[in-house]
Image (spheres, grey):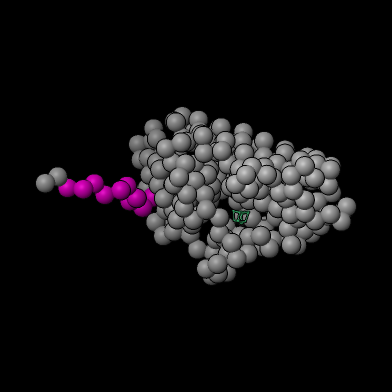
Amino acid sequence: MNFHSILNPSLLKDQLDLLARLYNKADLAVDNFVKKSGVSCPFGCGSCCEGFVPDILPLEAAALAAFIAIKNRPMAYEMAAMGLSSRDGSTTSCPLYNKETSYHCSVYEARPLICRLFAFSAVKSKTGEEAFSVCLHGLSSSGIRKAKGGMLKESFGIMPPVMADFGMELAAMEPDSSADRKILSEAVQLAMPKVLFIIGLGDSDPWHSGPGLKPLLTKAG
Ligand code: SF4
């Protein structure tokens, strides 16, 4: 599902178009790494989303908000007004985690960059050296579980994607907000009113009779 197709022409739609391309590039890099390295997740494992809520940028939050608005408009209004809460009431797991859905993620196609790269990407040290470890729950057909620097390619047969490199590309899409990371639940609630408004642009009722979510204007002196 194209998470930005629902938006009316706008700067946000153009930015989400770029974001979709970056996500696609990350997915291809991970697929390639998985095929050549023999590193994989155990079937049905969702442990990386349990006890973890990612920090994301506003643009990624807008992608999630648009995706949710396509799938379930009443839920989108509810999230804008009331925030996000997890299905099982957990305060430590990602609120979008859902064991009943594919890959246990209710927004799988629009999931943030860190969720795409987690467990299949290298980290970079302060000196620029790259290191990769197979996730605690992960499988490695070669038996090798970690390597760094010059040994990475030799150990895994291919260089893993580097999280920091993709992160830089993401930050460059909207430099003004590149330091504005927020926990996913908060970021999506903030992004949702803007996304719903852009979806409704051109309608006589851009809010589709949803709840009054426009930010209150401060009164002049
Ligand atoms: S967005 Fe999806 S993949 Fe990412 S932590 Fe939440 S449930 Fe997991």
Tell me: 144 left or right of 21: right
- Judging depth in this view, the residue of 29 and 80 nearest the camera is 29
Q: Which residue occupies 51% across, 34% down?
A: 173
Quarter of the figure that contains the N terminus: top right
Residue 163 lies, with reference to residue 119, above or below; the image says above
Q: Which residue occupies 52% across, 68% down?
A: 91
217 in the magenta segment: yes
Task: Name, please, the residue furthest toward the right.
Answer: 142
Q: Which residue occupies 26% across, 49% down?
A: 216
Residue 161 lies, with reference to residue 92, above or below; the image says above
Please state the horizontal and vertical placement of residue 56, each as a whole percent of the image: 52, 49
Inspect this view and state whether residue 213 appears: yes
Tell me: 62 left or right of 98: left
Residue 213 lies, with reference to residue 169, above or below; the image says below
Please state the horizontal and vertical placement of residue 215, each as a whole percent of the image: 30, 48
- Judging depth in this view, the residue of 167 and 22 nearest the camera is 167
- Judging depth in this view, the residue of 169 and 111 nearest the camera is 169
- Judging depth in this view, the residue of 164 and 137 nearest the camera is 164
Task: Name, please, the residue furthest toward the front.
Answer: 127
Task: Name, please, the residue furthest toward the left.
Answer: 221
Inspect this view and state whether residue 196 appears: no
Tell me: 220 left or right of 111: left
139 in the magenta segment: no
Please state the horizontal and vertical placement of residue 84, each as a whole percent of the image: 48, 59
Q: Magenta segment range?
A: 210-219
Q: Main secondary structure of the magenta part?
A: loop
Residue 68 lies, with reference to residue 3, above or below; the image says below
Please state the horizontal and vertical placement of residue 214, each as a whole percent of the image: 32, 47
